[in-house]
């Protein structure tokens, strides 16, 4: 089974932006993203996975250079924590989640975040995937 979660807001800040924030601002940002992911999960029926592939697609409103490691550390962390908070995944460790590189797209009219979830557990659509 595959699900698409959509969050209609600009993608999370990069690691470089987050590391310079006040700790209280960082905490509020993390809570906001947990809630956004939880609402997006509820909008598709709040799926639950034992093992899943999580493909994150960030749609920015302008083109510029972005580092994959900064995206993974910031957006990846906020989104995986949100999936745990929403009880979509039991944990975000390597035995539970396969996380391909984060994709970056440009959409000047509608910056957003898409989270694609694919079931990898026994009996799921892709039960022969290596974890």
Image (spheres, helix red, strand yellow):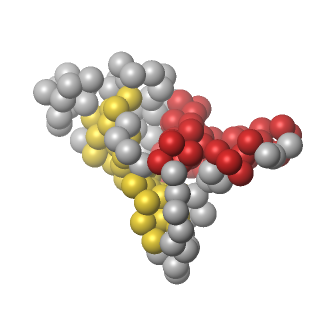
Check the picture and name the quadrant holding the N terminus. Answer: top left
Residue pictured at 45% horizontal, 21% vertical: 93
Q: Nearer the viewer, residue 106 or 92?
A: 106
* Rendered image quadrant of residue 86: top right
Judged left or right of residue 32, residue 72 is left
Q: Is residue 122 above or below residue 29?
A: above
Residue pictured at 69% horizontal, 41% vertical: 30
Judged left or right of residue 103, residue 18 is right
Q: Position of residue 108 (x, y in %)?
A: 52, 79
Q: Nearer the viewer, residue 105 or 66?
A: 66
Residue 37 visible somewhere in the drawing: no
Residue 130 visible somewhere in the drawing: yes
Q: Is residue 98 above or below residue 41?
A: above
Q: Nearer the viewer, residue 116 or 124?
A: 116
Q: Is residue 120 above or below residue 59?
A: above
Q: How many badges with numbers are in the image?
A: 0
Q: Residue furthest top?
A: 95
Residue pictured at 65% horizontal, 53% vertical: 13
Q: Residue furthest left?
A: 128
Q: Position of residue 87 (x, y in %)?
A: 51, 30
Q: Position of residue 74 (x, y in %)?
A: 60, 43
Check the picture and name the quadrant holding the C terminus. Answer: top left
Residue pictured at 47% horizontal, 48% vertical: 68
Q: Position of residue 97 (x, y in %)?
A: 38, 29
Q: Nearer the viewer, residue 95 or 22?
A: 22
């Amino acid at each position: 089974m595959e699900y698409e979660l959509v969050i209609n807001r600009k993608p999370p800040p990069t690691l470089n932006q987050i590391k310079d924030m006040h700790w209280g601002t960082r905490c509020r940002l993390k809570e906001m993203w947990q809630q956004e992911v939880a609402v997006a999960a509820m909008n598709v029926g709040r799926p639950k996975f034992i093992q899943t592939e999580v493909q994150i697609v960030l749609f920015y409103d302008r083109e510029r250079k972005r580092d994959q490691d900064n995206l993974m550390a910031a957006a990846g962390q906020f989104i995986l924590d949100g999936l745990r908070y929403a009880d979509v995944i039991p944990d975000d460790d390597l035995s539970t989640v396969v996380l391909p590189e984060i994709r970056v797209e440009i959409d000047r009219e509608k910056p957003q975040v898409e989270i694609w979830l694919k079931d990898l557990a026994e009996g799921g659509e892709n039960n022969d995937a290596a974890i």
